Image: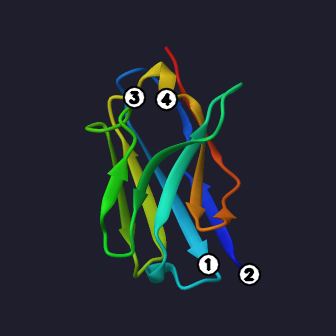
Amino acid sequence: QVQLVESGGGLVQPGGSLRLSCSASGFIFSEFSMGWYRQAPGKERELVATITSGGRTNYADSVKGRFTISRDNAKNTVSLQMNSLKPEDTAVYYCNAARIWGQGTQVTVSS
């Protein structure tokens, strides 16, 4: 069964950190580019970061220098380390591979 399962969301204060993880199954993970997207209430889903099968990364301007995407092909996981979080980072975060989407994990940044 092709599946992406996110974990690691939660409530954090501004300036804090969270690490999201996405576990993949049902496809050859190492051959796929992986991405993290987010969707805030009332807004469209937007790209956060991507990582190619070769490890090349790309980030939205709004998260550059604060977020880091990484992958572990041995464990079929992709992670998103989020530092210096801001209230505007509040959203549901989704893991993506091609047309495969996870169920999302809520990140709330609030004091």
Kind of residue at disc 1: Ser
Residue closest to the eye, 64 or 10? 64
- Disc 2 is placed on an element classified as loop
Kind of residue at disc 2: Gln
Residue name at image x 49 percent, y 75 percent:
32
- Could you tell which of marks 2 and 3 lies nearer the N-terminus? 2
Q: CA distance from mark 4 to mark 1?
A: 28 Å
Point out residue 22 in the picture as x, y percentages from the top left corner. Answer: 53, 61
Q: Residues within 10 Å of mark 1 (few under 14, many from 20)?
A: some
- Disc 3 is placed on an element classified as loop
Residue name at image x 35 percent, y 35 percent:
61
Q: CA distance from mark 4 to mark 3?
A: 6 Å
- Could you tell which of marks 3 and 1 lies nearer the N-terminus? 1
Kind of residue at disc 3: Leu
Residue name at image x 42 percent, y 57 percent:
50
Kind of residue at disc 4: Asp
Residue 8 seen anywhere in this rendered image of the structure: no
Q: CA distance from mark 2 to mark 3?
A: 34 Å
Residue hosting label 4: 89
Point out residue 11 in the picture as x, y percentages from the top left corner. Answer: 55, 30
- Could you tell which of marks 2 and 1 lies nearer the N-terminus? 2
Residue 21 seen anywhere in this rendered image of the structure: yes
- Could you tell which of marks 4 and 1 lies nearer the N-terminus? 1
Above or below: residue 58 compared with residue 53: above
Residue hosting label 1: 25
Residue hosting label 2: 1
Point out residue 86 in the picture as x, y percentages from the top left corner. Answer: 42, 23
In contact (CB < 8 Å): disc 2 and disc 1:
yes
Residue hosting label 3: 85
Please identify the quarter of the rendering in which residue 92 is found. top right
Q: Residues within 10 Å of mark 2 (few under 14, many from 20)?
A: few
Q: Looking at the figure, which quarter contains the N terminus?
A: bottom right
